[in-house]
Amino acid sequence: MNGATFVESVQRSGLEHASATAFFIRDRAYSYGELLARVALIRERLETELPASANVGIVTFDDIDTYAGIVATWFAGKTMVPVSSSHPADRTLSVLDQADIQVCLCSGDIPRGLEGASRTRFIRIADDAPAVVPRPPHIPSGSDTAYILFTSGTTGKPKGVPISHGALDSFLRAFFAFDFGFTAADRFLQMFDPTFDFSIMSYCVPLSIGASVYTVPNEGIKYAQIYRMLEEHRLTCAPMVPSILAHLRPYFGEIDLPDVRASVFCGEALYDDLVTEWLRCTPNSRLINFYGPTEATVFCTAYECERSSPRKTLNGIVCIGRPMQGTQITIVDEDRRPVPQGTLGELCLAGPQLTAGYFNNPPANDAAFFVLDGTRYYRSGDLCQTDPDGDLYYCGRVDQQIKIQGYRVELSEIEHHVRQLTGIKHVAAATSQDDGGNTIIHLFLEQFAGSIPDLLASLRTKVPAYMIPARVASLPALPLNNNGKIDRPALARLAARPPEQ
Amino acid sequence: MSTQQDILRRVQSVFAQVFKDPDISISETTAAKDIPEWDSLNHTILLAAVEDHFGIKFALKEVMRFKNVGDMCVVIERKISG
């Protein structure tokens, strides 16, 4: 990075490594020269069609134009708003509407149900469009918005998190401070949909240094594809969510990946026993457990897992370490007062990686941000405590938010849609862990007489696949606590029981 | 019934059990994209159930090349006949 902004770094990668592989997608390599040629084409079209400060939608596919579209949006000085081609149309329409997307890049078929988007035009750049001369990128100011990602919202409406170029650059600097010694020869795994912010690390880090990004195909079974990519292409940096390890666990004895030198985890609880086994599979790898919400740009605390010495854990879960360069933390009680060291409280984050606030959402901002001693903090909703060394331990949530394969899921969003679909008022979602440590969503409905497959099919039109409950049960009445509220601990116990055969 | 047909029929019975759908119909070309519930988690459960049913164990190098049910059946046939 050398103090340059991300867009300048990408431009330099393109000039210095024009023939080197920028992306490897679906068994084809694309050089930096090819990438920047597509970027120039897409950028020209965006600048012709849109006013200067517009948000640009990008329907994400596993193809070069999706990534070229992201870079082109930034080179044009605009804001990138990715929407997944596999998410339900209702959800995507809400995002396009909230972000006022007039032009949406779409390099594949327009997903079903989006044709009706009234204000949005979908643009596809022809593969054989005549080349245009690449121009130097627009250099953004630190406060210009780089991207807006939408996360699960409790009311059924996704919440937009805008991240500035300044925050993105701060994140990249803090990541490079770990001194992995990455060079243009490194090969990075990119297993995430670009609507998920861990993807930002997986492709922005390599692009900023002229290294290569290997994307994992969307079809098929993800963990099997990930292993195939790591092995066949001898990838050197593997950013993954921990649930991938849980899936690979039955095969650890067969895995030997000596080329991996950085295993980067984030997004979910990382179990210490899996770390021990994964380090055996990757004999030359450093392994860092990162933590952070989308609101603080990908991740902002880190704990390096040593190979030999005992690691810091709580209930078998690896600690999330200390703030990364630039990030400040405090842990507060319910009245937002800092708690003494070692006391459980809500983790709050501050620093240059923090979002300026949810997009057009004052109520959510009032609830999530506050100023303490002149510093603006974000309430993560995560319950944490520190040890005497200052290392952080994740201890759960203050609310009903959970993680599925790294994705944030508000259980209340699922409940909201089920209530709307069924007309049943008493609906509750709960979670359990299976033998492999994977989180499973259970849905309980009061006196539901309809068809469960039909209900799930309808729910699929409202929420992404990872939010679909794995188990559904109708109860004569949902258990209530003394306050007449749904007794969630009782439902969690119900969910933890083995299913009836 | 040929061995391949027999294997496919038995694999279908495992699918019916894992996906809780007694009427599920699969062919050799059925892939994860054809069954909405066939995600990574259910894939793990499915493979374990198939392994139990046939008394075999898949290797990761085999699993990572499964593109559809047919690929799985080929490996099953090789393992139960070998």
Image (spheres, rainbow, N blue to C red):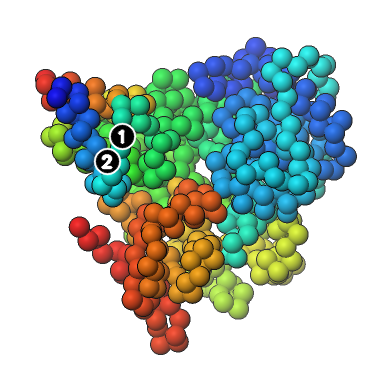
- Chain to which mark 2 belongs: B
- The span from disc 1 to disc 2 (Cα, nearest Å) is 8 Å
Q: Quadrant of residue B66?
A: top left
Question: In this view of the protein, which residue sits in the foreground, A347 or A195?
Answer: A195
A335 or B59: nearer the viewer = B59
Residue A211, compared with residue A78, is above or below; it is above
Q: Mark 2 points at which residue?
A: B15
- Do we see residue A283 in this rendering? no
* SS at mark 1 in the image: loop
> Is A460 rendered above or below residue A238?
below
Q: How crowded is mark 1: few (under 14 residues within 10 Å), some or many (20 or more)?
A: some
Quarter of the image with the N terminus of chain A in it: top right
In this view, A351 is above or below A71: below
Q: Can residue A338 be seen?
A: yes
Q: Which chain carries label 1?
A: B
Q: Which amino acid does label 2 sit on?
A: Phe
Q: Which residue is located at x 56 percent, y 35 percent?
A: A202
The residue at which mark 1 appears reads as B26
